Amino acid sequence: MLRDTTSKVVLFGGIAIILLGAMMPNWIVNQLMFGFSRALAILGLLVLWRTGLVSFGHAFYFGLGAYTVAIVDIQLGVTDVFIRLLGGAMIAGFAGFVIGFIMRNYRDIFFAMLNTAISMVLYGIIVKTESLGSTDGFAISLPTIFGIAPETKYPLFVIITMIAMISALAVNFYLKTTVGRLTTPIRDNEIRVEYLGFSVAHAIHLKYTISAVLAGGAGALMAMSLGQVDPDSMINWTVSGELVFITILSGPGNVIAPFIGSLVFEVLRTYAFELAPQAWQLIVGATFLTIIFFLPGGIWSLIAKLGRKNS
Amino acid sequence: MTRAAPIIEIRDLLKTFGAVVAAKDINIDISRGEIVGIIGANGAGKTCFVNMVTGYLSPTSGSITFEGVELVGKGPREVTHAGISRSFQVSQVFHSMTVAENLRIALAIAENRGVNALRIMESDALEAKCNDVLKRYKLEDYRDMTVSVLSQGIRKLLDIAMAVVSEPRILLLDEPTSGISVEEKFDFMDVVMGALKEDNVTVLFVEHDMEIVERYVSRVLAFYQGEIIADMSPDKALADDKVQEFVIGKRH
Ligand SMILES: Nc1ncnc2c1ncn2[C@@H]1O[C@H](COP(=O)(O)OP(=O)(O)OP(=O)(O)O)[C@@H](O)[C@H]1O
Ligand SMILES: [Mg+2]
């Protein structure tokens, strides 16, 4: 299971980042936490994108994961990082499984926008409901790890990095299974897939549920990293757009790509904002156009090219 | 002479699209191992028949019993699982993948039903099977070529090869030789029928070329306006008045 190059890079790269993190300044550790948390959602979108499906509404699952953390914290006093994460991922996954019965019947723009519609409903409900924090959201207490409240952010960073590694390895494995390989075949010819004896609906349902679990986990980790949740930075349609943006920026080529893409995005946005607070979208947008024109395979295609040259 | 129970029994099959009757009064039994040619003019209902047997269309009424199992109401996937495969009039393969990739995914799906689909696909056994199919269908030279650059003939071979990897007991081929040049037709059919003979598959194929029909089939079903107007051996069928008039189009 861990014999391929990608798995090795994930494993050793992840361990190296965890070790280096101990020496890095706080702001870098923070950027890595945000980047890796969000990358889980991108990993889920990658699974869908390979099959030709783009969701413009995965902030729904991202937000569900984040808000689950807030609600179990405030209502039940749950502080354990793993229970919070599991709760967020499972609630989102369950929602994805249920909604998947509808989504698996749609493709292309209908699939994309139906997801947007669902996320807007959740956004609307939260904004209008005082007990769900309305537009302000909630502050979240610091997570505990096996009952211990850590003094720095480093332990949470280690956990997020490890979750990221496990997720990348799991998706990498999934993509090599028979159902995981049903990507281009479904894009090319669904009828043939059915006549080979595989249900396209089941395959898409599974992919969709996987993407929901990952987006929920991403939201849960992001909420704990930030120490707060609010509808505009968790569930709004702009968040969904951002996720799609990073997915394309990263490229579908490899499970490592979402992590690199997310970090690039974090850095890009931070610097663009510092450089031009009024026009940072301009810089981000221009970068996006450059990627689409010159690197349609995303940042990963550049890395793959360099890798091939060196070997 | 006592005959073995038929592998498939079709009773009173009817299919209408509004006022159009695409299939009517179809009653046939087919025995294991038969090679059946389906002939008929354009629009006679041949594809419609293939589509009904393979679960793509459900008949308006009637029944199709395969090895004792009712097929009406089952979709393409369930019919495949039951043991019937098909190829298409226009080849249906994964055009942006290579020939070998097409076969690998077909083999993996055939072997890994249910939760087994969550097992790693690559294996030496899969590769060996893929090579075996490539060889039997004379596709070795095209192994790593993307389907979209290949000729119609090669695509059709691949289409059929993909249909048989699930080891069906009945195979329906919808115009396997359409789009293939006259010179290549016989070679093509030799490859296909040779490969199928090894597996003892019951084959039904739709064909316009009567030379092909004469050479390869043991029985002919002639369709005209959704009905079977002749069900007999090829030599008798080709001499039959009705077949001459309504299928081949020669008037006496
Ligand atoms: N989905 C459909 N809706 C309406 N009519 C249909 C449909 N499918 C087939 N038909 C009609 O049913 C009849 C039989 O069509 P079918 O495709 O089976 O013919 P065919 O014998 O395969 O002809 P060809 O040699 O041209 O392939 C035709 O009159 C056709 O117009
Ligand atoms: Mg036809």
Image: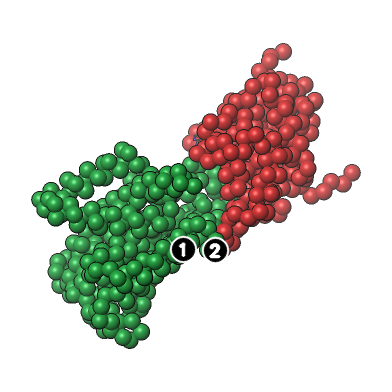
Chain colours: A green, B red
Q: Which secondary structure lies at badge 2? A: loop
Q: Measured along the vertical axis of the image, is residue A294 above or below residue B6?
A: above
Badge 2 sits on which subunit?
A
Residue B13: mark: none
Q: In the picture shown, does residue A69 fall above or below B56?
A: below
Q: Amino acid at mark 1?
A: Leu
**In the drawing, does residue A139 fall left or right of residue B114?**
left
Residue at x-position 52% and y-position 33%: B148
Closest to the observer, B34 or B196: B196
Question: Between disc 2 and disc 1, whose residue precedes?
Answer: 2
Query: For mark 2, what is the residue?
Result: A1
State left or right for residue A195 relative to residue B34: left
The answer to whether one can see residue A95 in this image is no
Q: Could you classify mark 2 by the number of other residues whose Cα lies within 10 Å: few (under 14), some (14-19), or many (20 or more)?
A: few
Q: Label 1: which residue? A: A169
Q: CA distance from mark 2 to mark 1?
A: 9 Å
Q: Are marks 2 and 1 in contact (CB under 8 Å)?
A: yes
Q: Horizontal and vertical percent for residue B142?
A: 62, 35
Residue depicted at x 53% and y 58%:
A4
